[in-house]
Every structure is written in C-alpha cells, then in structure tokens.
Image (cartoon, coloured by chain):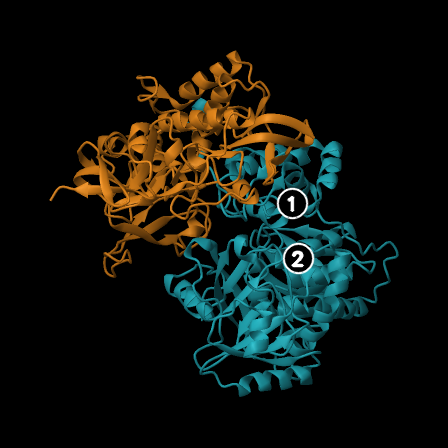
Chain colours: A orange, B cyan
C-alpha cells in the first residue's frame, strides 16, 4: 500500500486548487486522482466565457480558467494520475482506485480532500409521465455531446428547469442553428444566475415560462413533443392550462446533486440541506483527516468560489497531514435562520477561529431589500450590507472576521438569517 | 426450409430456443424489436419468481408456476443469472378481510406450493421491521424469489446461440401461412422465412399470430403496469417481496427488492388498446405511491431513480395457451403468457421444446453445452479478483458507469457476445450501465463511443433501442463541417 500525505479525489477546479494549496503549505507527497483522461473536470466542456471575474478580474472560458490551475500544477510538478477511478474510501483513509494502466491500487492517506463535484438530477427523479423515448438529456450530457464530441442531440429544443447549464445550453444550441422554443421552470423564479437569464435567453428571444412544468412526453422512439402546463402554488399542474410544444429534444436542468457515494463509504456525515458533507470552518468533515470542498460540498454557481474554498481545504488538509493541527475540541452549530437554506460551514470552533469565515448559502426565496445578519445565541452581532435582491439561483455569502468570535468566547449557537426591510 | 422459427425473443421464446437447442435442429428466433427482451413484457415486469398460490387451481398458470419455480435454483446456476429465494409475503391491512389469506393459502396448497404459513402481526413485524403499522397479518411464501427478467432472457439467448440457434431482429411478421411441409412467414419488409414448425412466443402479438392460422381464436387484452424504481440505498428496507392482499380496493401494489438492490414499487393494472403503449401516466404513478405507502409509509421522495411501464399480454380466456394448435399442425403456441410467465418460463421452455422436438422427430444434440458464463460483474468482485481481471484486460480498469461501477471491459464484452448489444438499452440491460441513480447522464456519451468502435458505426447511427430512437441528429456545424 502506497503512503500519501494528502490525497485529492478529483482533478477538477476544486481538486486542482486544493492540491496547489497543499503543496504551497509544504506537502511534497501528495497525489491527485482523476477519473477522466485529463485534468480540468467539468470546466473542459464549459466553453462559454464568464469564468474568473472574481478570482482573476477577467472573463475566461471554462477551459482557460482550468488551464491556469493546470499550468500552476505543472509548474509545481504536482503528482497526478488520470483515468483513475476511486472505488472506495475507508474511515481510516485507505483509498482503493483502479486504472487501466496501474491496475488496482491502494493508498494510505494521512489526509484526504474530497473534490468529486456533483451530478445532474435525471428525468427519473422527477417522474415525468409519458414515453421513454430518445431525445431527453440532462443539460450537461447534451453539453458534453456538443462541446466535446461535436454532435448535436437534436434541433428543436425545450428546456425544463432554469439551472445555469440549461440556460447556457439554450444559447449554445441556438448558436448551432437549433430552435430553442422555451425554458420551462416549475418555480416562480429561476434557479440560474440573472446574468445567464439575460445573456442566454432574453438576448435570443427564448421565453422563460415560470410556474410551468412538463406533464407529458410524446414520441414512441424519438421525442416528438412535450405537453407543458402551468402549476399552482402547490406546484401541481392546473388542469386546462396544458399546451403542446413539438420538439425533438428535451433538456433537463433541474438541479445538481453533490456526488457523495465515496464520502458515505468513508463515514462522512452528510447534510440533508446541501446533500454534501457537514464541515467546520476548516472544511473538515466529521471523519478526522477528511476534508471536502467545491461542488461535492455544496453546489456553487461560480467556480471562483470553488477555487477559494478548495484552496482552504487543501491548506487545512496539509496542516493536518503535517501534524500542525491541534485537536480543535467541540464545535458549535451554525443554524439556518429566516430565508437561509444550506449554510456552510455547519459547525464552527468558535474559540479557534484564526481566519475569516465565509458563510455561504442559498436564499429560500426571492427577497428584495434584504441583508444577511448573524446572531450569536439569538443576539444580533453582525449586519451585512443591504442587497437590492437575493434569489435561490445565486449563492449568498457573508465573510465574518475572526475578531467577532474573539469578542464572544462563550457563544454556543450561530444563526445566519436574512432580514427583509419592511 | 429451417426446422423451427420461434417468433418472439422474450423470456419464453429464448427459454424455448435454449431447450430446443438440446436437439439437432436448425432454429431461428425472430423479433420485431432490435434486441432480446425488448418487447415490453420481458423487459419491464415485477421480476418475481412467484410461489404459485395466486393462480386458479387446475389452470396451466398454476401448473407451470409451481413447476417453473422449482427449476430456478438449477437454471440460475447453469446460466449464471442472479436469483434469490428470499420469500414473498402477501400482506393484509386493517380493514381487509383476513379470510382472503386463508383462501390464498388453501389455493396454494392445492396448487402444490410448499411451506405456506400465516403470520400474525408480531411475526410479520419481526420478519419485516419496516412494514407499515396498519399491516396486521400476512401469508408467508418461502419459495418466492427474485430474478432479473432481462438478464435471464439474455442468458437463455446466449446459451441458445452458443448451441447453434440463430437470431434475427427488426423482423416483424406480416403474414403467416401454411405451405407444404411447414410454414411461411412474410415479414413487413417483404422477406420470406420458412420452417417446418413455428413457435408463437410473441407476447402481445401472440393472439394475432394464433388467429392467422387457427380457428381457436385468442384475443390478447394488453394490460399496462406502471412502476417506480427506488435507489439501492434503500435496498435493506424489506427482505422479502411484499405483496398486498387483493381486496375490493384493488389488486394491491408490490414493494420488492430486485437482485440488483433497487426497490420496485408497482404495478398498476390498466387495460390499454395499444400493446406497445408503455407510457407512464401521472394518475398511474400516483396510484402506485398511494398503495405502496401502506406497505412502506413515508417513502422518501428523493429516492426515485426512474419510472417505467410494462405490458402484460392478458389472454381473453384467462389462461396460458400452450402447445400445438389443434387445427394447425406444426404451429405451437406459447400465447397469452402474462404473470406468472417469468416464473413459468423454464418449465414452459422444456415442455414446448419437447413437443416441437417430438413433432419433428428430432435427435439429441450431442454437443449441447448447458453452461453459460456471465459477463464478469466488476462491482461484485473482490479487490484481488479485480486486480487479476485488469491485468488480463486493461479495459476492466476503466469505469464507464460510475453509479453501478460498470467497466469498459464489461460493455465491450456485452457488445461482442451473441446475440450482442447493439443499442444503448442493450448495453444497459446486459451490464447495468445507465441503470443507476444518474440514469445514463454520465455514461451515455462513453457508451456511444464504445458502440461506435465495436460496431464500426457513426455516433449518429447509435440508437437507444433501435428504430428511430437515435441519440444524436448530426455533427455540429452541419454535414459539411464534418467532412
């Protein structure tokens, strides 16, 4: 069994940032395991621009953004192994992986960074009635066919769900001469970024039909059309509002699920709100020496924040592997207050905070004239700056300085909440 | 002229083909679909090896159910198909007429089903701790089991092919007529096929075929069943297959673990006009959940990975129709094989093959090889076995389907076998690639690439299940850009 100080599972943006940070924190013996044939993760197929505004102050495409990290990894000569799938992680950090060239390998890691990313929710999870024909794809699968394989999944398209990949694919398919007839969203608001609604739908005259869903799928062999209907407040279709849209392709952009099968095998506790691990301010999970970052932890909408978060996880994993971390003792819980869903981190060692903590979460609804507030034991200790609008489609963040914790050494519960101006 | 043409490559047709290949015969199996088990019956059913208490005593259904059930241990070993005799429970709920359980038990005993026992609530809860609180008693059927219907069909087909049986797909029968010394099939594409004997194992088409040649008419009344499939995380919820006691509220909905660890909820029973109508409906799926929640309260909403529907070929006279039509010598029926057809298949195959062989006065095939070897299931191997396999063939070291841990090696083998996978669904049924929780989102581009490599096809030629079920409509930038 090979000994590794920091083993990073996944060579996408999260894994790359974690590995670079781990090396910069002094770990020589690290290893990235990546299941695809090259590094870069999902960014390889994200050929549109808009990446890196926060991190680099310029607009990059997905592959360009990834390449910056790959270049840095090469410069640091970070060890990595592609075409390698991790099959199992144990609570004592034994990692089993296979590859065609290396066969079955086992590693004993001092620390692990989970950076496996997320996957798309499929049709089956929604129970859409109708035929089970070809022509129904999750948006990311269609994106791979178009951008990496060079083939079109169809010509006349309806998109169900308004997640960012679906929006991006609406524009991409339009560029390829396809007719995108509608983007249909169950909720009264989009689950994607505002800028994508504007740049991918509005600019091309593609209607966004809120409060609508697909209620039937027609086509024995290849998709021939979908029936959509308006939904009421209970999200159930309203009889009589059905309309049929002929199309040969239905793209689903109905949510992303962190991919945590390996985490579960390792005994990592997951949060029902995020479907990702429960972590503390150092991105440590409940299993000693196992850290998590990026979309495996919670689904981000900007890769820039993935990089930032993952660098922190990589650095903390390095410190753990090098024996530089003391036992942090018990942590206090971070709770979701009004309007807040899936706050990360979920635990804080209030007496040990030595760096700013960025709380991240999804607003539960669309709120106008709103600010993020933090309570310690029910007493407000921080009021964020006001926002014009917050929506579930855009992750909200608030950075809290260590001083705030130093000022309140006895805090036993943290609540992150929204305050809407009356 | 061939000796035998079997129409229908479902579990009945393939079992019969395999049993017939024990004789020196020239056998062809035809099917209108693009693959074995791709019709609507064998690919989508409840995957249960029934005990045999349900069928009316004295019927062919009862006889072949009990006989088929007893053959499953041996046939599953010979064909290397997963089978588990985990028992069935027929559960009665508050308000049900409990005498129904006694009636089922008595009927089962008449049918020759061993080991039947009525459990009280405490005994039921001890056996199945997750059963709903309104379940008050159950019939315990220890001989009940579970098997994968398409894996069994594929295994029969592969073993038949290894013993010389030929397969021809995308072949639909337009006309069937008697000719001197046998029968002539004219296909919808105008091809003619001739054989001394015909086996009608055409599922929902079996009535139509029978009525082409026999005055003893048979109507098939297609009945659709809708199902939910639940993620394997919930595999341990129930040990046995959980039936519900039929009542005036309906036949009940089953909750059953599959051999692959997922849970099936279903089926509904809706009469449909069109035997190919495998649509799911909002009403049907809602009904499944409503009834299934009696057995399994608080079914987790996030647990569903897919929904589907299958079709059962319900015979108008209520029973299987088996054997030579009295007015059509050499035309053998296995018609109207609805539930418990999967359970009955091994026994039907043996008897039907026997009758056909007697009719043809066929000699034994001395080189018959009963053993079929399964495609290695990487996910079920030990690490030592995995290391050996990858060393032999590096393609087993590359995972293509992450949810079900299916390797490239398994997929290539599924395509290379006879009859091999030609479509995305063909690969799926043979390897489980695409059957998991992401439902082929991750693996389908990779499987398309492998199918293209193995079959020498372009990506635009790959289909989900044949016909016009193409996956990709063309290269980006149009045809010119592709040149």
Is A290 above or below relative to B76?
Answer: above
Please state if A367 lies on the left or on the right of A248 as rendered: left
Q: Residue at x 77, y 56 (%)?
A: B26
Give the image quarter of residue B289: bottom left
Q: Is residue B217 visible?
A: no
Crowd band around label 2 with a 10 angstrom C-alpha radius: few (<14), some (14–19), many (20+): many
| Residue visible at 71% across and 61% down in the picture | B15
The residues tagged by marks 2 and 1 sit, at their Cα atoms, a distance apart of: 21 Å
- The residue that label 1 is drawn on is B379
**Helix, strand or loop status at disc 2:** helix
The spot of residue A1 in percent (x, y) is: 70, 30
Q: Residues within 10 Å of mark 1 (few under 14, many from 20)?
A: few
Nearer-the-camera pick, A242 or A274: A274
Relative to B274, does residue B136 appear above or below in the rendering?
below
Q: Position of residue B467 (x, y in %)?
A: 51, 47
Q: Chain of mark 2?
A: B
Q: Nearer the viewer, residue B318 or B424?
A: B424
Q: Which mark is residue B153?
A: 2
Residue A152 seen in render: yes
> In the figure, B146 relative to B460: above or below?
below
Q: Quick one: A190 or B482, which is closer to the camera?
A: A190
The residue most toward the front is A410
> Residue reaching furthest top?
A75
Q: Quadrant of the N terminus of chain B?
A: bottom right
């Amino acid at each position: 069994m090979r000994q590794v100080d920091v083993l990073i599972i996944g060579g996408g943006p999260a894994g790359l940032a974690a590995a670079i940070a781990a090396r910069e924190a002094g770990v020589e013996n690290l290893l990235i395991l990546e299941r695809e044939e090259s590094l870069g993760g999902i960014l390889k197929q994200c050929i549109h621009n808009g990446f890196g505004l926060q991190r680099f102050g310029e607009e990059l495409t997905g592959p360009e953004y990834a390449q910056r990290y790959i270049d840095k990894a090469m410069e640091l000569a970070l060890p990595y192994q592609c075409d390698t799938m991790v099959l199992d992680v144990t609570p004592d950090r034994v990692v089993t992986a296979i590859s065609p060239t290396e066969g079955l390998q086992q590693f004993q890691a001092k620390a692990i960074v989970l950076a496996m990313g997320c996957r798309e929710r499929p049709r089956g999870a929604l129970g859409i009635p109708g035929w089970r024909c070809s022509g129904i794809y999750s948006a990311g699968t269609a994106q791979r066919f178009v951008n990496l394989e060079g083939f079109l999944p169809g010509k006349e398209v309806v998109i169900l769900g308004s997640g960012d990949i679906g929006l991006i694919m609406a524009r991409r398919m339009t560029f390829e001469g396809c007719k995108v007839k509608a983007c249909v969203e169950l909720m009264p608001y989009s689950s994607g970024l505002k800028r994508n609604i504007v740049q991918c739908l509005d600019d091309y005259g593609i209607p966004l039909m809120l409060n609508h869903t697909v209620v039937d799928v027609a086509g024995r062999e290849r998709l021939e059309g979908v029936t959509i209907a308006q939904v009421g407040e209970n999200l159930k279709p309203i009889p009589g509002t059905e309309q049929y849209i002929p199309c040969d392709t239905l793209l689903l952009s109905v949510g992303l699920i962190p991919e945590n099968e390996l985490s579960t095998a390792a005994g990592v506790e997951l949060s029902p709100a995020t479907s990702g691990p429960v972590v503390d301010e150092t991105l440590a999970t409940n299993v000693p020496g196992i850290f998590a970052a990026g979309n495996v932890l919670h689904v981000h909408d900007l890769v820039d924040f993935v990089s930032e978060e993952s660098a922190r996880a990589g650095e903390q994993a390095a410190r753990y592997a090098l024996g530089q971390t003391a036992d942090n003792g018990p942590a206090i819980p971070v709770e979701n207050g009004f309007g807040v869903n899936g706050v990360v981190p979920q635990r804080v060692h209030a007496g040990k905070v030595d760096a700013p903590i960025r709380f991240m979460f999804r607003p539960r609804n669309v709120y106008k004239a709103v600010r993020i507030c933090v309570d310690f034991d029910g007493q407000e200790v921080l009021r964020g700056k006001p926002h014009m609008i917050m929506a579930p489609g855009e992750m909200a963040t608030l950075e809290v300085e260590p001083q705030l914790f130093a000022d309140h050494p006895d805090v036993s519960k943290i609540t992150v909440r929204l305050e809407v101006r009356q | 002229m061939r000796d035998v043409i079997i129409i229908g490559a479902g579990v009945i047709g393939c079992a019969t083909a395999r049993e017939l290949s024990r004789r020196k015969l020239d056998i062809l199996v035809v099917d209108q679909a693009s693959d074995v088990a791709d019709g609507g019956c064998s690919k989508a059913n409840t995957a249960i090896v029934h005990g045999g208490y349900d069928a009316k005593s004295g019927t062919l259904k009862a006889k072949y159910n009990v006989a088929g059930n007893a053959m499953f241990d041996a046939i599953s070993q010979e064909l290397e198909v997963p089978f588990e005799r985990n028992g069935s429970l027929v559960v009665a709920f508050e308000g049900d007429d409990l005498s129904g359980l006694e009636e089922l038990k008595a009927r089962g005993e008449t049918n020759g089903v061993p080991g039947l026992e009525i459990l009280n609530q405490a005994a039921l809860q001890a056996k199945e701790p997750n059963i709903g609180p309104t379940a008050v008693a159950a019939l315990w059927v220890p001989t009940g089991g579970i098997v994968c219907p398409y894996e069994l069909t594929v295994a029969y087909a592969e073993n038949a092919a290894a013993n010389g049986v030929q397969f021809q797909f995308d072949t639909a029968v337009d006309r069937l007529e008697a000719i001197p010394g046998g029968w002539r099939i004219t296909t919808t594409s105008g091809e003619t096929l001739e054989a001394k004997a015909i086996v009608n194992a055409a599922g929902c088409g079996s009535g139509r075929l029978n009525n082409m040649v026999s005055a003893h008419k048979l109507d098939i009344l297609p009945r659709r069943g809708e199902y939910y499939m639940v993620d394997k995380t919930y595999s341990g919820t129930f040990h046995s297959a959980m039936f519900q006691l039929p009542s005036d509220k309906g036949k009940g909905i089953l909750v059953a673990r599959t051999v692959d660890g997922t849970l099936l909820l279903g089926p509904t029973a809706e009469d449909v006009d069109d035997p190919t109508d495998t649509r799911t409906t909002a009403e049907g799926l809602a009904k499944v959940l409503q009834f299934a929640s009696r057995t399994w309260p608080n079914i987790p909403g996030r647990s569903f990975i897919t929904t589907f529907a299958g079709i059962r070929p319900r015979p108008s006279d209520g029973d299987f129709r088996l054997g030579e039509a009295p007015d059509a010598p050499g035309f053998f029926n296995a018609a109207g094989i609805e539930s418990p057809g999967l359970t009955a298949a091994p026994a039907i195959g043996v008897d039907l093959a026997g009758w056909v062989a007697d009719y043809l006065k066929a000699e034994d095939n001395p080189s018959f090889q009963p053993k079929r070897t399964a495609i290695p299931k990487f996910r079920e191997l030990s690490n030592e076995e995995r290391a050996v396999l990858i060393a032999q063939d590096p393609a087993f070291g590359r995972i293509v389907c992450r949810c079900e841990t299916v390797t490239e090696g398994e997929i290539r083998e599924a395509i290379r076998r006879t009859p091999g996978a030609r479509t995305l669904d063909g690969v799926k049924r043979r390897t489980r690639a695409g059957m998991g929780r992401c439902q082929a989102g991750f693996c389908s581009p990779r499987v398309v690439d492998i199918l293209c490599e193995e079959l020498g096809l372009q990506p635009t030629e790959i289909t989900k299940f044949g016909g016009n079920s193409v996956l990709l409509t063309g290269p980006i930038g149009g045809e010119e850009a592709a040149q």
